[in-house]
Amino acid sequence: MASSPLPTAAMMPGRPKNSLGPLVLFHGCDKNVAQSVLRGEATLQPSENDYDWLGNGIYFWVDSPERALAWAKLRRSSPSVVGAFAYPGNCLNLTDYGVMNELALAYEATVGISVAAGTLLPVNSVRKNGIFMKRQLDCAVIQLVHKIRESKGMDAYDTVYGVFEEGDLVYPGAGFRDRTHVQISIRNHEMILGYFRIDGMT
């Protein structure tokens, strides 16, 4: 019998729970959605696109209402922004040293599953200024991280947090890009402590 392509629980690195403090977050959306959420009539829904770079979840910009509004203006007919206070909880923090080991193991498992099924491996696509804007491969790997943890009886990640480099170089030879941002994908809605209105954006 062929061995499972999934890593064992012992191979998956342990992550300290609650390693990030409470965050102030901003979600770009349609004005009708924002008003319904602020009235307590609805909740924000998770994004489940196969190219979402942090996997499935409710996406927020960290500390940047302006970036959330800029995103909404490009994609919504009545752009608006909802603010939220949230606790990251058990967070897959992609800025932390050592966490990429878990993604590397999940990538190897993703390759093994694709080979066993005879399917093509997902690929990141839509390159702008050297940056992949649609991240089908990254999404598949992060989603498999969650599945592996579930299959091994490990604590689920409540959130996924990372830095996305985007845009033009700020100046020739720079190591900075003018649209770089920090985002968090919230998988466990209970991490959201509450929503708030932003003057001029809701």
Image (cartoon, helix red, strand yellow):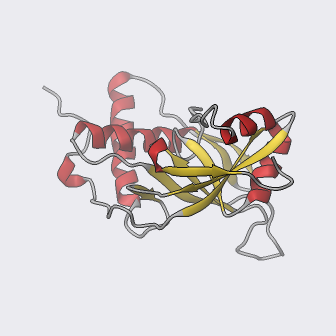
Count of numbered badges drawn on the protein:
0
For the point 42% across and 48% down, which residue is it? 158
125, above or below 64, in the image:
above
Observer able to see residue 85: yes
Observer able to see residue 187: no
For the point 56% across and 63% down, which residue is it? 23
Q: Position of residue 48 (x, y in %)?
A: 56, 32
Q: Position of residue 186 (x, y in %)?
A: 51, 46
Q: Quadrant of residue 43?
A: top right
Q: Position of residue 113 (x, y in %)?
A: 34, 31
Q: Is residue 37 left or right of residue 15?
A: right
Q: Quadrant of residue 25?
A: bottom right
Q: Residue furthest front?
A: 39
Q: Residue furthest top?
A: 118
For the point 45% across and 66% down, which residue is it? 20
The residue closer to the viewer here, 74 or 100, is 74
182, above or below 30, in the image:
below
Q: Position of residue 26 (x, y in %)?
A: 68, 53
45, above or below 189, in the image:
above
The residue closer to the viewer here, 19 or 102, is 19
Quadrant the N terminus occupies: top left
The residue closer to the viewer here, 146 or 196, is 196
Q: Is residue 77 left or right of residue 47?
A: right
